[in-house]
Image (tube, rainbow, N blue to C red):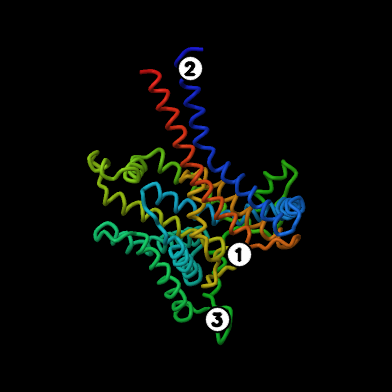
């Protein structure tokens, strides 16, 4: 074997080692979970059986895939921002306001289906972009850190959305605990993709139940992942985003307009974030409510970190978090293990991935230094 082939093989091994942090972090977190289950007084084998029984049934698999779709979009929104060195903590508020805009567009506009559904999608994206506009402006022109401004905008979004649904966009006549906008018109409701998806899954002897949300948001999620991957890896703008994220000073010397790139990155992240709530608004409930599922934006942060900001990795990380959520319900239903344990395990998994990633990077860096020293 030639020296060049040996060096290539060694470099390939280094890359595999560096990329194994998410897997090792997950395995470590699962090991800790089993230890905690034992300390609680529950059988680890019973806990594993409960997770498998509840998560890998026909309905369980369907729910894992369905509930992963908004998580994948939230992860992609955070991954794009992270690639540009931006901490967009405001995805939570951006998808909340984007969902409201989508719900209003679906309820109040009268358009044919082929126009109404795209308008609803665009309204969601514009809502997310509008909500990140002020933090982007403050970041680029006033030097205000985006973590502070985006967190504040999350709180403003919650208050403003509540006011708008209580007032001009209230779809409930009289007093009601079910605060919502009017129902979307039929032309704005997302179509079901059950027949399309099941035509593929039947080849493997599986079929998604009709009561699980298999809808147009699945296609949106796929397009978001493909679009962000193409943007970051195959376009000049994506290269600029990654340059600015890695070293803004070097990017400036390379001729990159750092301010413009940061502003554009935040707008793209906000547009993607505005799509997170569309499955709930345009398919499941068919209206917007301030009680829409919360926390997806913060979960998206964890997903992006676990995926190391790789759009393809976001898909697997989103499915993993959806699985963990489902597993938590299984543990709560069939064992004495509290559902809150899964939240703790999710946090531990992220911490483990970060720590293991740094340890592996240092280890590989030392191996490379020794290799260079031996060749000198």
Q: Is residue 254 left or right of residue 97?
A: left
Q: Which residue is mark 1?
A: 284
Of label 1 and label 3, which has the lower sequence position?
3
Residue 267 placement (x, y as % from top left): 36, 56
The reply to whether callout 1 and callout 3 are in contact (CB within 8 Å) is no
State whether residue 168 is above or below residue 96.
Answer: below
State whether residue 273 is above or below residue 355.
Answer: below
- Please tell me whether mark 3 or mark 2 is closer to you in this view: 2
Looking at the rendered structure, the secondary structure element under dot 2 is: helix
- Please tell me whether mark 1 or mark 2 is closer to you in this view: 2
Q: Is residue 134 left or right of residue 47?
A: left
Q: Residues within 10 Å of mark 3 (few under 14, many from 20)?
A: some
Q: Which residue is mark 3?
A: 172
The reply to whether callout 3 and callout 2 are in contact (CB within 8 Å) is no
- Residue 5 is labelled as 2
Residue 58 placement (x, y as % from top left): 73, 52
Furthest-top residue in view?
A: 1
Q: What's the distance in space between the residues labelled 1 and 2, CA to CA? A: 55 Å
């Amino acid at each position: 074997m030639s020296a060049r082939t040996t060096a290539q093989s060694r470099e390939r091994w280094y890359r595999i080692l560096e990329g194994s942090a998410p897997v090792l972090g997950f395995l470590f977190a699962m090991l800790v979970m089993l230890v905690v289950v034992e300390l609680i007084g529950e059988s680890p084998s019973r806990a594993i059986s409960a997770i498998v029984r509840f998560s890998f049934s026909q309905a369980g698999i369907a729910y894992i895939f369905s509930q992963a779709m908004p998580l994948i979009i939230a992860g992609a929104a955070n991954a794009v921002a992270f690639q540009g060195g931006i901490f967009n903590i405001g995805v939570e508020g951006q998808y909340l306001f984007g969902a409201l805009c989508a719900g209003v567009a679906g309820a109040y506009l009268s358009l044919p289906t082929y126009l109404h559904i795209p308008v609803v999608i665009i309204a969601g994206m514009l809502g997310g972009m509008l909500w990140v506009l002020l933090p982007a402006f403050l970041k680029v022109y006033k030097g205000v850190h985006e973590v502070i401004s985006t967190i504040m905008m999350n709180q403003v979004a919650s208050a403003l959305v509540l006011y708008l649904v209580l007032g001009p966009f209230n779809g409930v006549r009289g007093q009601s605990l079910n605060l919502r906008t009017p129902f979307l018109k039929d032309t704005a409701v997302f179509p079901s993709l059950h027949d399309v998806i099941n035509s593929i899954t039947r080849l493997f002897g599986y079929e998604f139940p009709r009561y699980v949300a298999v809808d147009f948001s699945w296609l949106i999620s796929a397009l978001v992942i493909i679009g962000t991957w193409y943007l970051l890896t195959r376009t000049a703008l994506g290269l600029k985003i990654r340059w600015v994220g890695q070293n803004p000073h070097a990017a400036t010397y390379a001729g990159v307009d750092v301010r413009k790139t940061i502003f554009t990155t935040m707008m793209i992240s906000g547009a993607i974030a505005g799509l997170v709530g569309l499955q709930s608004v345009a398919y499941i409930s068919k209206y917007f409510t301030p009680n829409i599922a919360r926390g997806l934006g913060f979960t998206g942060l964890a997903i992006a970190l676990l995926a190391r900001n790789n759009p393809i990795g976001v898909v697997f990380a989103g499915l993993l978090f959806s699985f963990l959520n489902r597993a938590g319900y299984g543990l709560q239903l069939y064992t004495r293990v509290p559902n809150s344990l899964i939240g703790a395990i999710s946090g531990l998994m992220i911490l483990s991935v970060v720590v293991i990633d740094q340890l592996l990077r240092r280890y590989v860096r030392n191996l490379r230094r020794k290799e260079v020293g031996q060749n000198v």
